[in-house]
Image (cartoon, rainbow, N blue to C red):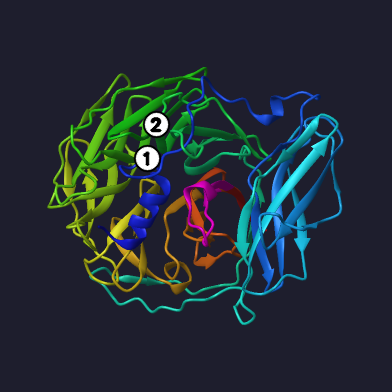
C-alpha cells in the first residue's frame, strides 16, 4: 500500500484502522496510577520483557509495584504453557512505586520457543503478567547485527559527520502496563519537567481507548485519559502542565482532546466523510492559540490527500495546502508562528512514493523541493525544529534511510551510516548540541553537537521506539511499543519507555 517502513508503523501504532482487531472494553473513567493504591492490595505488575543474552540464556524484566506489602516474585517457564520450571522466590520489597525486577533464565535450548509468566505475591494476593512467548537465539546468531550503508549523493549537499565513540546511555524505566491488557505509546511531549506520553490501551475482543501516562521523574504512571471508546492517540504537544493537546483517530475520523490541567475535553476536528478513514498523526504548538496538526484523508486508497488543521485556541479548522496525487503527511513542527514544516510523501499509493516537504510562512503553505540520498523516491517520516534556524528531518528511500539538517537557511544531507542504517522515526533536542533520534527495533542515536552516534541498543522483542522528547538539556525520554516477533499478535504489544542521557 505504501512505503514498507511507514506501513509497518502505521499498522503498529494505529490499531483501530479498518479491519484491525480492536481491543479494550471501554473504561467508565480514568484509571488511577498504581502509586495511588494503598497497602491491602495485591501487587501490581506490568508487561514482561525478554532480553536475549545468548542462545541458551535470556533476561526476564518486568515492573512490579508491591503496593505497600512485602512482595516476592517467581518466573514460570517452559516449552509449553504448562511451564514445568520455576525460579526461586525473589524479594521485591514493600514499596508503593513501580520497580523493575530482573531474572536470568539459563540452560535453555537454542532456537526454541518458550512460554514464560512472572507472578508477584504478597499477603493480599497474587498478580501475573500472563503467558508470553519468546524464541531463543540460534547458536550462531549474532548479538547485534550492524548494517553498513554508503548513501548516494542526492540533490542536496552532504554534510559528512564522522562516527565517534558514544558517551551516552539508555536506561529502561517502568510504565504502567496493567496485566491482561495490551498497550503502546505513540507520542510524547515535555513542557519543562512536565511530560505526557500518549497512545492506546486494549483488551482482546474489546475496543481500544486512549492511554495517557505522566513522567514522575523516575517512571511513567497512568494519568487521567480521554474516555472516548475506540479512539487512539498518536501525538501530543504540551505548552504547560495545564495546556496539552493530543491528536489521533477515532474510528474513521480524526480526533483531538485538550488537557486543561484538570480534565480532558474532546475537541471536534474537521474530518471529511470517507469510507477509508482520516487521521491526524502529528501536532505542534507555538502558543495556546496557535497549533498545527498534520495527517491525511482516505488513508487506504489512491485518493489519499494531505490534511492540515489549525487550532486557534477555540476550534480546529482545515487549512488548504498543495496536495499532489496520493499524498500523506507524517509530521509537522513549528519553530515560530511564521515558520512551520510539514513532511510526508506523494504518489504514496500503492507503493514507495516521492518525498514531500511543505513550509508555512505565516500566511500560506508551499512545497519546498527536497530529496534524500536516493533522489526523490521515498518519504519523510518525521520533522523536528528546535530553534528558528535548526530542524532535523528523516525518511526512507528505495535503498536506505536518510537524515537532513536545516541550518543557515538551507537543508543538508547528513552522510553518516551510523544514523541512517537503521532509520529514524522521531527526533528531539534538549539543546542545539544535545539531540536524540529513535526508531524501529529500539534503535537510538545521540547528537553531541558535532556528530551522530548510535547509542547502545537495548535488546528487544520487536516493535520499537515511536517518539522522543527532552525535559531538559541533559536527558530525553523515548517511548514506543514492544511486539513479539514470533507471534506478531496484537495481544503481545506492550508500551515501553527509556531514559536517555549523556554519561
The answer to which of 41 and 313 lies nearer the viewer is: 41
Left or right of residue 97, residue 332 in this image:
left
The answer to which of 32 and 240 lies nearer the viewer is: 32
Q: Residues within 10 Å of mark 1 (few under 14, many from 20)?
A: many
Magenta range: 478-496
Which of pointers 2 and 1 lies earlier in the amino acid sequence? 1
The residue indicated by pointer 2 is 230
Task: Report the Cα–Cα distance between label 2 and label 1.
Answer: 7 Å
Is 384 rendered above or below residue 485?
above
Q: Is residue 253 visible in this depiction of the protein? A: yes
Q: Position of residue 6 (x, y in %)?
A: 34, 56
The quarter of the displayed image where residue 376 is located:
bottom left
Q: Position of residue 442 (x, y in %)?
A: 53, 59
Left or right of residue 137, residue 359 in this image:
left
Helix, strand or loop under label 1: loop
- Residue 16 is labelled as 1
Amino acid at each position: 500500500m505504501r512505503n514498507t517502513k511507514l506501513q509497518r508503523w502505521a499498522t503498529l501504532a494505529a490499531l483501530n484502522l479498518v479491519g484491525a482487531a480492536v481491543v479494550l472494553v471501554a473504561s467508565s473513567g480514568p484509571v488511577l496510577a498504581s502509586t495511588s493504591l494503598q497497602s491491602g492490595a495485591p501487587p501490581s505488575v506490568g508487561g514482561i520483557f525478554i532480553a536475549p543474552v545468548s542462545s541458551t540464556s535470556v533476561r526476564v524484566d518486568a515492573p512490579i509495584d508491591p503496593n505497600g506489602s512485602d512482595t516476592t516474585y517467581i518466573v514460570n517457564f517452559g516449552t509449553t504453557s504448562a511451564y514445568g520450571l520455576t525460579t526461586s522466590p525473589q524479594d521485591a520489597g514493600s514499596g508503593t512505586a513501580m520497580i523493575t525486577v530482573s531474572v536470568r533464565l539459563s540452560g535453555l535450548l537454542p532456537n526454541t520457543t518458550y512460554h514464560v509468566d512472572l507472578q508477584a505475591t504478597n499477603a493480599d494476593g497474587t498478580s501475573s503478567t500472563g503467558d508470553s512467548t519468546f524464541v531463543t537465539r540460534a547458536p550462531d546468531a549474532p548479538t547485534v547485527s550492524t548494517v553498513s550503508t554508503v548513501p548516494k549523493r542526492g540533490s542536496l549537499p552532504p554534510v559528512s559527520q564522522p562516527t565517534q565513540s558514544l558517551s551516552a546511555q539508555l536506561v529502561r524505566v517502568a510504565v504502567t502496563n496493567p496485566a491482561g491488557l495490551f498497550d503502546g505509546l505513540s507520542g510524547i511531549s515535555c513542557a519543562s519537567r512536565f511530560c505526557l506520553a500518549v497512545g492506546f490501551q486494549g483488551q482482546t475482543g474489546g475496543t481500544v481507548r486512549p492511554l495517557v501516562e505522566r513522567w514522575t521523574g523516575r517512571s511513567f504512571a497512568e494519568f487521567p485519559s480521554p474516555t472516548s471508546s475506540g479512539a487512539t492517540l498518536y501525538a501530543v504537544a504540551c505548552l504547560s502542565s495545564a495546556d496539552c493537546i493530543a491528536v489521533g483517530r477515532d474510528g474513521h475520523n480524526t480526533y483531538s482532546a485538550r488537557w486543561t490541567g484538570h480534565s480532558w475535553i474532546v475537541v471536534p476536528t474537521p474530518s471529511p466523510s470517507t469510507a477509508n478513514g482520516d487521521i491526524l498523526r502529528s501536532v505542534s504548538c507555538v502558543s495556546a492559540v496557535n497549533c498545527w496538526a498534520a495527517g491525511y484523508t482516505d488513508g487506504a486508497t489512491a485518493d489519499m490527500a494531505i490534511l492540515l488543521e489549525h487550532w486557534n485556541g477555540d476550534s480546529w479548522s482545515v487549512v488548504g495546502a498543495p496536495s499532489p496525487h496520493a499524498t500523506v503527511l507524517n509530521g509537522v513542527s513549528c519553530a515560530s508562528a511564521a515558520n512551520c514544516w510539514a513532511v510526508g510523501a506523494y504518489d504514496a499509493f500503492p507503493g514507495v512514493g516521492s518525498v514531500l516537504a511543505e513550509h508555512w510562512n505565516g500566511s500560506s503553505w508551499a512545497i519546498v523541493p527536497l530529496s534524500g540520498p536516493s533522489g526523490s523516491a521515498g518519504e519523510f517520516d518525521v520533522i523536528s525544529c528546535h530553534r528558528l534556524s535548526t530542524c532535523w528531518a528523516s525518511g526512507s528511500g528505495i535503498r536506505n534511510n536518510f537524515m537532513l539538517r536545516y541550518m543557515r537557511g538551507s537543508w543538508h544531507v547528513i552522510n553518516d551510516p551510523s544514523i541512517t542504517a537503521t532509520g529514524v522515526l522521531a527526533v528531539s533536542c534538549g539543546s542545539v548540541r544535545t539531540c536524540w533520534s529513535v526508531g524501529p527495533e529500539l534503535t537510538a542515536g545521540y547528537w553531541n553537537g558535532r556528530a551522530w552516534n548510535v547509542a547502545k541498543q537495548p535488546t528487544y522483542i520487536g516493535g520499537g521506539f515511536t517518539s522522543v522528547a527532552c525535559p531538559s538539556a541533559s536527558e530525553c525520554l523515548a517511548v514506543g511499543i514492544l511486539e513479539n516477533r514470533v507471534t506478531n499478535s496484537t495481544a503481545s504489544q506492550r508500551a515501553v519507555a527509556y531514559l536517555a542521557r549523556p554519561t
